[in-house]
Image: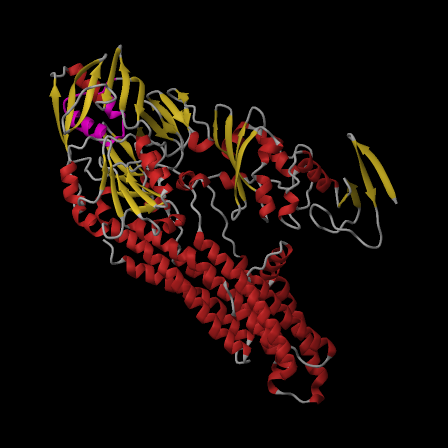
Amino acid sequence: MTNIIKKRDFLVTFEYYSPVMKNCYHCNNPCEEEIVFDQKTFCCEGCRTVYEILSSNKLDGYYTLNENPGVRTESARGGKYNYLDLDDIKSKLLLFSEEGISKVRLSLPQIHCSSCLWLLERLHKLNPGVISSQVNFVDKEAEITFKDQEVSLKQLAELLSAIGYPPDISLSAYDEEKTKKRNNRLIIQIGIAGFCFGNIMLLSFPEYLGIDESFKDFQNTFNYLNLALSIPVLVFGARDYIVSSFKALRSKQVNIDVPITLGIFALYIRSLYEVISGTGAGYFDSFAGLIFFLLIGKWFQQQTYTAINFERDYKSYFPIATSRKNGEEEEIVPLKQIKVGDRLIIRNNELIPADALLVEGSGRIDYSFVSGESTPISKKIGDKIFAGGRQTGATLEIEVIKDVENSYLTRLWNNPVFHRKKKFAGISDNISKYFTLLILLISLIAGIVWLQIDASRAPFIITSILIVACPCAIALSVPFTFGNVIRQLGRRALYLRSTEVIEPINEVTDVIFDKTGTLTLSDQVNVSWEGEALTNDQLNAVYSITYQSAHPLSRSISNFLSNRATKVDVSELSELPGKGISAKIGDQQIRVGSASWLNVSSDTLQTRVFVELNGIVLGSFVFGNSYRKGLKELFEQMNSRFKLHVLSGDNDSEKERLVEMFGSNVDMQFNQSPEDKLSYISNLQDQGKTVMMLGDGLNDAGALKQADVGIAVVDDVYAFSPSSDAIMDGKKIDQLLHYLNYSAFGIKVVWLSYGFSILYNSIGMYFALTGQLTPLVAAILMPLSSISVVLLVTLLTTLKARSLN
């Protein structure tokens, strides 16, 4: 029977076929009622509509990435998302909302394959109001930036629902006063599997005691009781393994649960056959014990991973600090100590760490790290400012209204634009995949051979092979090794952005150092004034403008003047990296910066910062630099492994001193602008060099981003710069080589763990192939391989870290 209904400007054909059902082109589910559109069959109107949307927007490439990429859609009930138009609801859900641009993070539980990722990151093609969409595949979440004047939050939810990804919106997830309920599902699985396992063993005593044939009916009753007890073990206890395997195979993937599931079915089907046919009691005790010990191993793995969890607790040691007002004084405090109600001082180009209200000053907030829009947004006293913005003007005083969310700042730092290529992660994935395929092949061959030798033992042999040879230990080597490396380095004040930074660190050939603030001490600079005697108003003006800046020289000047000047209001503040800072104070135009920027002729060999008032140069501050301790020894050790370079924005007044520390074979370039530094690094990379750059997070932002590894060296005020791959406490720079050697040791540990995993599995495989290993023992040994690798890599990297200062 065929019905044709005209809808919009196309024909929808409903065709009902019997008895053979076709599968849906979108979700691959069987079509009870077939809907044909564009010569393709769909199971429902929802799937057809999704296809139509994708096809009309030229996004039908979605169906080429995986065989079954789609999920069955359910049309949203009328008004289902109307509540998303309420202001109080939006305020809880939105991460950011300024000048018509909003950002939201939504849970999308339907995400399951690369096609989902491909489609969701192209939402802007489905609705031009969407600016960008970034998907977290593991957590099944998407952060979506959109123009709220073109598409509302409600319309965004409806769009996601229409294409098969209805957002799971739970307001309690955004309520900070509520905590997530603990998931006890695994404990329940263990309890049920353990209960059934114990009772199956109890009911198997006729088999254990070898009761003769006269009690066969009695024994059959017990066998069927065991069969009944095995059902919840299979359906509930083994469910995660079976579902995971099904999803992997459906996506044409082979994960580590596939061989486990095959072993489970081999054992269960054999047992089921024996009981139903009356030829034996089956192996339900071994089957239930297998699931029970697999679940126990899974729980023990989770406890082990939690105990030595490498995931960085940014609230504990992530190196971001800020200036907090304490009465009339300022104190530098780490963000973990910031509380709601605290007053923070935010200087030019500093990041706003938490949602806050502007209390004093005039804000010009650059939200480019949050929304991608770099045009500064003006803020007045009483306005709300979102975390992640950067002040681009005079100093602000803000009052915190929401706790610092370090995970949010971390996501900014880990923006995909800064990601590095991960070689080792790819190696782990490939080894795990091919290892699993190899195990399947070996188990097939072993099964055929044992069917000839002893058919009754073949299921045991196959199951033992599939269970004991688990590649998950190999897959865990990289995350736990690299994770513990960055944790240990973090404890020693070198904070890596992510584990991806470790690989390029170990490939570095050239190391470039900035001078000011990197090799020199910002808080131990001898400052003096040369020029006309400054009036009190002029002192106040210079102090007020340098106070706004986070540059090391500006901070040195403001500290020098702090006891003899007071702050006054500044306006039209502008800071040019590598040049200087300018502002208006009343009707006075003042500039503080380099000689070249102010067009001053200076042949002195000293570091100077000039002051110009209304076009007249009044004089300059002269700096006598103090260098960090241990530099000469550091450079002597590094010269044998790396080509060293110095790029400085200052003149060559201290070249002789630098040569004394570095040696004569070091390339030194002076009077370098930020653009010059970036170009210098690019030229080295064109020559095939892998470059590490150490500089400050402001003037050297471009160079840090260009370098293969960019390290921001900081002192009392911690710098948050997405341009850097790492942040290092300046007091620890003399330990740089030890830290580089430690990261290289982490690479060696990865290879060692690979060897250990392969050896462990090879031994287990031998005993399984020769029939000396039962599935029950294999289930106990399998998690031990993963746990042993995790413990090995953690122990080695932790012990090695003890040699670091």
Res 93 seen here: yes
Q: Residue at x 29, y 50 (%)?
A: 491
Q: Is residue 319 above or below residue 621?
A: below
Displayed quadrant of residue 230: bottom right
Q: Residue at x 69, y 42 (%)?
A: 74
Displayed quadrant of residue 665: top left
Is residue 202 found left or right of 313 in the rendered image? right
Is residue 308 found left or right of 560 in the rendered image? right
Residue that sits furthest to the right in the current view: 1
Res 197 seen here: no
Is residue 175 found left or right of 605 in the rendered image? right
Snapshot colouring = secondary structure
Q: Nearer the viewer, residue 747 or 372?
A: 747
Q: Residue 284: horizontal and vertical position, in percent?
A: 62, 74
Q: Residue 349: horizontal and vertical position, in percent?
A: 33, 29
Is residue 29 found left or right of 555 in the rendered image? right
Q: Is residue 643 above or below residue 351?
A: below
Q: Residue 551: horizontal and vertical position, in percent?
A: 26, 30
* Magenta-tinted stretch: 545-568
Displayed quadrant of residue 375: top left
Q: Nearer the viewer, residue 358 or 121?
A: 121
Residue that sits furthest to the front in the current view: 687
Q: Is 547 inside the magenta-drawn segment?
A: yes
Q: Residue at x 26, y 47 (%)?
A: 643
Q: Nearer the viewer, residue 252 or 190?
A: 252
Q: Residue 82: horizontal and vertical position, in percent?
A: 62, 31
Q: Is 110 inside the magenta-drawn segment?
A: no
